Image (spheres, helix red, strand yellow):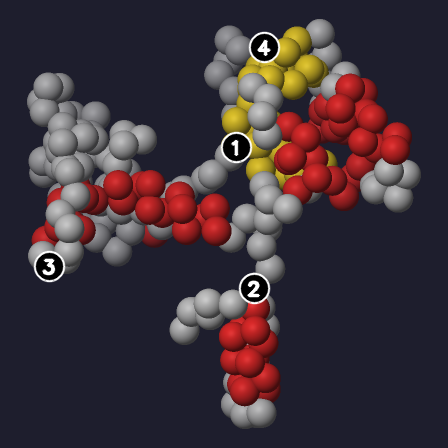
């Protein structure tokens, strides 16, 4: 059941509490996450947080002027991506508070060490390399015993084995159209990797709705 307003949500929770068979609570929204690229390999996890505060004036000023705000509660290193053998920089994913997000949101880079490092919002969406559906990975796929579906042309072969480089057909949008014949049909002339994919856009919108931007 969807609640239109906070009042509706409170009413629903109160009603459910009167029935001992159910428990109810309002789901909490998570903080925004950003992915920061090209961070020097010499900067460790603790150093990443120190550097982002020390080298970026707006952030430094925020924590100086708001003594009660703890840096450790506003900027958290979640993980770093595995890098290639010849790379000398790391890519880190940080979880940041809404206040920090609103300081950084209109910037394209942040200073780390001696570099201006590019960053962007991190919206992780699982996608299966076997069936190309969102929400799970290949090891979890219920259809893994079936033939692979190509993420490029929707053919019955692996994406790596696709030879139809000029053909783009999104299997996720194809599935949507088949399953929803009475709804507006989606364009399928793209690969599952395309940022123009309507299925991907809709999923991102749902994820964004559950993020606390302040």
Vertical order, 179 against 103 (above or below): below
The residue where tag 1 is placed is: 121
Discs 3, 2 touching: Cβ within 8 Å: no
- Residue carrying label 2: 27
Whichever of labels 3 and 1 marks the residue nearer the N terminus, that label is 1
> Of marks 4 and 3, which one's residue comes earlier in the chain?
4
Q: Residues within 10 Å of mark 4 (few under 14, many from 20)?
A: few
Q: Is residue 207 above or below residue 91?
A: below
Task: For marks 4 and 2, give the one nearer the viewer.
Answer: 2
Q: Are marks 1 and 4 in contact (CB under 8 Å)?
A: no
Residue positioned 26% across, 56% down in the render: 142
Dot 2, crowdedness within 10 Å: few (<14), some or many (≥20)? few
Q: Are marks 4 and 2 in contact (CB under 8 Å)?
A: no
Pair 3/2: label in front: 3
User: In the displayed structure, would residue 172 be above or below residue 90?
Assistant: below
Secondary structure at numbered mark 4: loop
Expressed as whole percent of the image width and height from the top left, the position of residue 156 reads 9, 38
Of residues 164 and 168, the one nearer the viewer is 168
Q: Hey, which quadrant is residue 71 in on the image?
A: top right
Q: Which mark is residue 160?
A: none
Which labelled disc corresponds to residue 182?
3
Please name the residue shown 58% across and 10% down the image: 88
Q: Which of the marked residues, 2 or 1, is nearer the chain's N terminus?
A: 2
Residue for badge 4: 88
């Amino acid at each position: 059941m969807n609640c239109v307003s906070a009042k509706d949500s409170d009413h629903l929770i109160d009603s459910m509490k009167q029935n001992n068979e159910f428990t109810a609570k309002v789901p909490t929204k998570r903080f925004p996450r950003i992915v920061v690229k090209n961070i020097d390999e010499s900067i460790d996890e603790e150093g990443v947080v120190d550097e982002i505060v020390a080298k970026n004036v707006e952030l430094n000023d925020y924590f100086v002027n708001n003594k009660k705000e703890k840096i450790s509660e506003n900027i958290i290193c979640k993980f770093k991506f595995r890098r290639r053998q010849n790379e000398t920089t790391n890519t880190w994913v940080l979880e940041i508070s809404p206040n920090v997000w609103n300081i950084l949101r209109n910037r394209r880079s942040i200073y780390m060490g001696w570099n201006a490092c590019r960053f962007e919002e991190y919206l992780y969406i699982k996608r299966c390399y076997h069936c190309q559906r969102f929400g799970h990975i290949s090891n979890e796929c219920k259809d893994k015993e079936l033939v692979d579906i190509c993420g490029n042309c929707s053919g019955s072969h692996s994406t790596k084995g696709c030879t139809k480089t000029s053909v783009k057909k999104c299997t996720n949008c194809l599935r949507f159209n088949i399953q929803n014949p009475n709804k507006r049909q989606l364009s399928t002339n793209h690969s599952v990797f395309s940022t123009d994919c309507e299925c991907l856009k809709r999923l991102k919108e749902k994820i964004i709705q559950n993020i606390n931007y302040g």
